Amino acid sequence: EISRMGAIVAVAALSIKLHSKQVVGQLFVINE
């Protein structure tokens, strides 16, 4: 169970990082 929770947390962190990168990219496009 612990390893499963760790995997879920890792996937969630990855998706958040990817999403934040998309948001930052959109902001840069809007600014330019």
Image: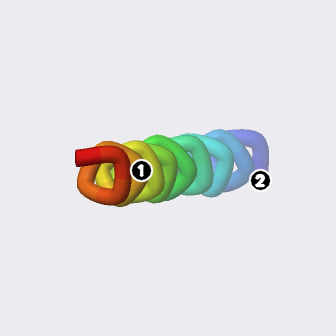
- Identify residue for label 2: 1
> Under tag 1, what secondary structure?
helix
Taking depth in this image into account, of 8 and 26 the one nearest to the observer is 26
Dividing the picture into quadrants, the one containing residue 24 is top left
> Residue at the spot x=35%, y=46% of the render?
31
Depth check, front residue: 5 or 9:
9
Q: In this rendering, does residue 20 appear at all?
A: yes
Q: Would you say 31 lies left or right of 29 here?
A: right
Q: Circle 1: is it few (<14), some (14-19), or many (20+) Cα within 10 Å?
A: few
Cα separation, mark 1 vs mark 2, equals 39 Å
Q: Amino acid at mark 1?
A: Leu
Specify the color scheme. rainbow
Specify the label residue 6 is tagged with.
none
- 32 with respect to 5 (left or right): left
Image spot of residue 30 (x, y percent): 35, 58
Front residue of this view, candidates 3 and 31: 31
Q: Residue beneath label 1, please?
A: 27
Question: First in sequence: mark 1 or mark 2?
Answer: 2
